[in-house]
Amino acid sequence: MNTDKQLHVTEIQRFCMHDGPGIRTTVFLKGCPLSCAWCHNPETQSAQSELLYDEKLCIGCGKCGDCSQKVHSFLPEHYVKRDHCLQCGLCAALCPTQALFMSGISYTLPELRDLVLRDLPFYGRDGGVTLSGGEPLAQEGTVEFLRLCKSAEISTAVETCGYVNLKILERIVPFVDFFLWDVKDTNSGRHKQYTGVSNKLILDRLQYADRLGAKTRLRCILINGVNTDTRHYSNIGALVQRLVNCQGVDILPYHAYGGRKSTLLGRRDNGKIEWIPTQDQIDCFADTLQNMNVAVRCL
């Protein structure tokens, strides 16, 4: 096993209750093959480290002004020239208020395992570590890291968009206790329009993982005016019925909070209030699944 490999991490969240069974430590990894229009974690899309800037925290101290690439100017106020930035992180290290900070820290696999092990007393019978993102299976070290976790008797879960390499999927299934599998839309045309890729490979990989014995739970974002139609709801129910090892569906109503993160990256706010589904739409989705004898939760 090559434990010199590294994983590129954006964030580690502890005491998570909705990322798999029990209390979990969720590790968000960088890089994703999809470009969802509603992405709630835009800082995880790129596989590279990125500089974020929160103007509300800036006190105008000028410590970042020594940047050799002249990324920061202060006339009349602090402005970040992102096209000049090399993502070196030196300015973020100097910032006293964390108005500037980096998304993306690399850990060796043993380092990351040891960070997760700190939370072992809280996991109880069902808890453990969940890899999320981004797309966890896009990084080469994921298989080895999960193997390390299993050898330390830590329960493992992976939240995946499903757009993954077949060989990686085959290698990883024995080391994953539970998959949270995103199925964003069962309409292939809409899926490609809003995420950049067709859903065919995602659904094929899901069914293949099921044949390998992978335990799954579908995660279905609900977006008003995009996938709020009864045919999609019925398609999700029929998909679950075809799977042997799927334990149900989590409905994730869209929220606009991710737009704030987009602005920190220097992009436009991608949050859309009009995409927030109504309670009637959420109930209709849940009722359709329940009427098909599919276990459903709304998160």
Image (cartoon, grey):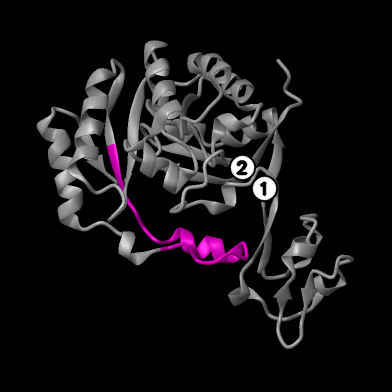
Whole-percent x, y for residue 60 in the image: 72, 81
Rendered image: mark on residue 31: none
Q: On the image, numbered disc 1 is attached to which residue?
A: 104
Which mark is on residue 30? 2
C-beta proximity under 8 Å, tags 1 and 2 = yes
Q: Is residue 91 left or right of residue 30?
A: right
Label 1 environment density (alpha carbons within 10 Å; few <14, some 14–19, many ≥20): many
Q: Which residue is at 40% across, 61% downward? A: 256
Which image quarter holds the N terminus? Answer: top right
Instruction: Name the one closer to the observer, 48 or 8.
Output: 48
Residue 265 lies in magenta, yes or no?
A: yes
Q: Observer-nearest residue: 184 or 56?
A: 184
Amino acid found under the numbered disc labelled 1: Gly
- Find residue 292 and report its image quarter: top left
Q: CA distance from mark 1 to mark 2?
A: 7 Å
Residue type, mark 2 in image: Lys
The span shown in magenta is 250-271
